Image (spheres, rainbow, N blue to C red):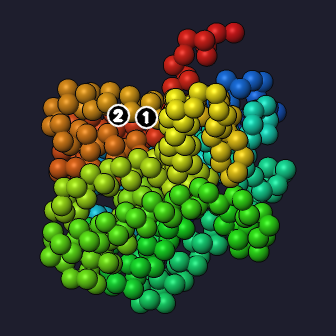
Amino acid sequence: MMVEGILILSCLIPALHFQDSTWPQILVSGLFPFNLGLLMLVRYHKYRTLANRRKAYLLVVLIWVVLALFGTLPFLTTGTLTHFADALFESMSGITSTGATVFASVEWLPASILLWRSMTQWFGGFGIVLMVLALVPSMGINKYSLYTAEASGADNTGKLTTSVGSTMRQTLGVYILLTMIFVYVLHKCGMQVWDAVNITFTNISSGGFSIYNDSLSGLTPKQQYVVAGAMLMSGVNFALLYNFFTFRWDKLRHKTEQLLCYLGIYTVSTVFVVLALKTTMQYGWEDSIRCGIVQTISVLTTTGSLAADTSQWWVPVTFLFVILSLCGGMAGSTTGGLKAMRVLILFRHVRKILRDRLHPHSVNPVRLNRKPVSADIATNVVVTFMVFMVTIVTSLLLLMLCGINATESFGASIACITGYGPGLGSTGGFGCYAAFTPLAKLICTLLMLMGRLECMTLLILFLPAFWKR
């Protein structure tokens, strides 16, 4: 709460610089959570440990809920949003780096609110990693089980050192370094510092909020390629990036299968999208290549930035984008979706079952990074996939009961749980979620939280056994 208060107070800088008359409201919005957090710290500073695993899961969920609730204050106090459901939707979308918005137009928003939207995504994109690594040592649970949210820590590429503090500093250092690099490069490509900061914040975090109504389509081709590079890096495991930047080549060896899967999916999908744009949309080769490269990486990393109005594109391309958003980037990155490692294990598990049927007495273990994956981990991957599918179907039905048509309900369900943002129909392309009913917006808000917490962390709270001694 104190950190969030400081971030809100940092929005005083553009409020005063651009003189948008919102500084009193921003000041109050920032001081309230900061002082409340300080009061709690002074009062309860002695309680530093958690007795069991259940309290750990509960606390992680509560952190995201509390951050989203206090994140509504800048919207409500400045009057940019007047309904709580809208403010909570926008705040949760930012803090979970989803990118879905209720604003039909953002260019009229005060500079302080534009920065706050970008700040929530930059903080939220890395926030879950930072908070979990800070909390886990006193929880008595595996310190990377929630960091990677992947098969009980099967991906050892997420582990840098035995010290949680060192790991937190190293991964955060990579995140900050990438942010600074892309702000500088965008500025050198002719972009104003204000624009470069906001665009970098929302794309390096796989968020997708924009300060322009047309997202990235108004940028120069060079600037769009730079943003595509930021999105591509955001989908890579930060531990691998740290080892790469520090020239620890020996630690990269035999740990790159997930990276190759991620890059392979991106390459094949980009080729398909480029050819589809050239043949069905009559784009020139330059526009086809540029839009294909930028938009495909935006979907695969669940960023949601748009190089063009994708709602007008060929239907098979739209369907491919739905599949890519479900895949997501690598574990240990800022992206949403199932993650490339789960996809890799899932397909290899299917291959193992087929081989076992053909040769029932042979031993065909599922391997990742040349090491056998335990049966429990493979089962967890399958269960997680099924939970995602059941959640999508359930939310689809609930949204239809709220009066949303089937196409938009399906698009919103996928977009919110994967963290992609833009959906189908009126919510796709440059559209927004303003026309949704308050109840539908609250359902989408819950989907964003579930997707960010990989479903399991939230669903476990609904087990009766969770609340029994």
Amino acid on which disc 2 is placed: Ile
Quadrant where the N terminus lies? top right
Res 446 label? none
The residue pinned by badge 1 equals: 388
Q: Is residue 201 above or below residue 434?
A: below
- Residue 243: image quadrant is bottom right
Residue situated in front as seen by the camera: 185 or 437? 185
Tag 2, which secondary structure? helix
The residue pinned by badge 2 equals: 392
Residue situated in front as seen by the camera: 427 or 276? 276
Give the x, y percent position of residue 177.
64, 72
Residue in the image at 46% along x and 40% along y: 451
Measure the C-alpha gap from mark 2 to mark 1. Answer: 6 Å
Residue in the image at 44% along x and 49% along y: 327
Amino acid on which disc 1 is placed: Phe
Instruction: Say few, some or many: other residues with alpha carbon within 10 Å of mark 2 (under 14 / 14 to 19 / 20 or more).
Output: many
Q: Is residue 408 above or below residue 432?
A: above
**Can you see residue 283?**
yes
Apparent side of residue 467 relative to residue 69 in the rendered image (left or right): right
Q: Is residue 33 above or below residue 460?
A: below
Give the x, y percent position of residue 164.
79, 49
Apparent side of residue 152 relative to residue 274 in the rendered image (left or right): right
Pointers 2 and 1 in contact (CB under 8 A)? yes
Quadrant where the C terminus lies? top right
Give the x, y percent position of residue 417.
40, 41
Tag 1, which secondary structure? helix
